Structure formats: C-alpha cells, structure tokens
Amino acid sequence: MTPAPRTTDPRLSSAGGGAPAATAGTAALTQLLGDGEVVLLAFRPSGWFVLLVSWPVLAAALVISLAALAAGTYLNLEAPRHLLLVLCSAGAALRIIIACIQWMGRLYVLTNYRIMRVRGVLRVDAFQCPLRRIRGTVLTATFTERMLGLGSLFFEVADEQPAAAAWTYISRPAEIQETVNQAIRRSQ
C-alpha cells in the first residue's frame, strides 16, 4: 500500500488559502502516487479566485441594476425594475456559487517526480508532467494579481503548450516558484 502523502514544508502546504495538503484530496492523491513518490506541495488557488473569475458577471449585473434603478427614477418605469434587480442578483449569486465549485475542484500538486494540475467537478481535467521534462518556470502576475499578492506559474515543458501546464491565482507565488525550481533541479 502506498503511504499517505506528506508535505515537507508545512508553510507551503496550504499556500493559496486552501486546506492543508493532508485534507486537500488526500485519498485521491494517494491513489495517484507511485512507489516512492512524496507530495511536496498540494494546494488550491487563492480564495480570491472566486471573485477574479466572477468579476465580469458581477460587473454586468451591477451595471444593469444601476441602469434599471436610473430608468425607474428618471423615466418613471416601475414595472420591470424590481424583476430586473432580482434577476441580476440571482445571476450574480449563481456565478459566485459556480466559481466556488470551480475553486473546490481545482488542485495543484508537486511531488518529488512530477507536477499535477487537476480541475473540474463533473468533468475532471488532469495534467501531469515529470519534473525532468520541465525546462523552467515563468512567474506572471496581472496588475490585479500583484495588488492581491497573487501570481500564475507557467511551466516550460518540452513539446507542450505553456498554458496547459499552469498554476493560476496562487498565493505566495515567488515562494512556490522557488520550491518548484528546487524540485526540478533535484530531479535532473
């Protein structure tokens, strides 16, 4: 039987504000691990993920709601205003719920042999790559991510699209990049 996954750095095991690696899908990770494979990092994206992926819908709902209020105030249109406000609120709430489910279904894992990215709830999309195939890492951050202390880590993998191998919206991205780079150096 494969031993339970463990982390070597407890500070980074919950990077991203999620649950520690011991509770972040341990049963599923145990089934994925090979002999002698040890989990170095296992975490979810930052909790800011929910708002960052939802903001376009939230902004649209706000604009439509404000327009409905303005139309009701200045044009004396009362009938559809309340219904429109309820629909906008319901749409925004639904998008937040979907984003929470997406966040819960996303897991980033670094072992002593490979990196993994698992995402999805109903249709699971998993990416894994041996560390020896990774040529390097690139850390990027949009203006909003920098303001929140987040970043995205892209892996330069031989014969793969960089976007396929990415950890997005991660907390403490520089620390995580250094941990990944150390694991890559050790594997080669």
Image (cartoon, rainbow, N blue to C red):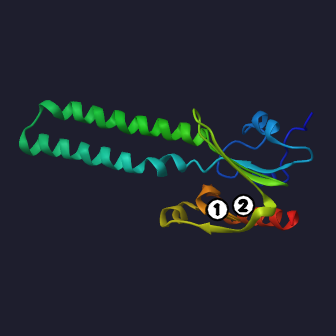
**Dot 1: few (<14), some (14–19), or many (≥20) neighbours within 10 Å?**
many
Question: Which residue is more in the foreground, 118 or 63?
Answer: 118
Where 166 sits versus 34, above or below? Answer: below
Quadrant of residue 180 within the rendered picture: bottom right
Residue 50: percent from left, percent from top: 51, 46
| Residue at 82 percent of width and 37 percent of height | 30
Where 150 sits versus 29, above or below? Answer: below
Residue 181: percent from left, percent from top: 77, 66
Quadrant of residue 11 within the rendered picture: bottom right
**Dot 2: few (<14), some (14–19), or many (≥20) neighbours within 10 Å?**
some
Quadrant of residue 115 within the rendered picture: bottom right
Check the picture and name the quadrant holding the N terminus: top right
Question: Which residue is more in the foreground, 108 or 8?
Answer: 108
Which mark is drawn over residue 126? Answer: none
**Residue 4 appears left or right of 50:** right
Q: Are marks 1 and 2 in contact (CB under 8 Å)?
A: yes
Determine the residue located farthest toward the left in the rendered image.
75
Question: Which residue is more in the foreground, 87 or 72?
Answer: 87
Check the picture and name the quadrant holding the C terminus: bottom right
Q: Specify the amino acid type for callout 1.
A: Leu
Q: Which label's residue is closer to the chain start, 1 or 2? A: 1
Residue 176: percent from left, percent from top: 72, 61
Which mark is drawn over residue 153? Answer: 1
Question: Mark 1 against mark 2, which lies toward the viewer?
Answer: 1
| Residue at 35 percent of width and 33 percent of height | 90
Q: Specify the amino acid type for callout 2.
A: Ile
Label 2: which secondary element: helix
Question: Which residue is more in the foreground, 99 or 148?
Answer: 99
Q: State the count of labels.
A: 2
Q: Which residue is mark 2?
A: 176
Label 1: which secondary element: strand
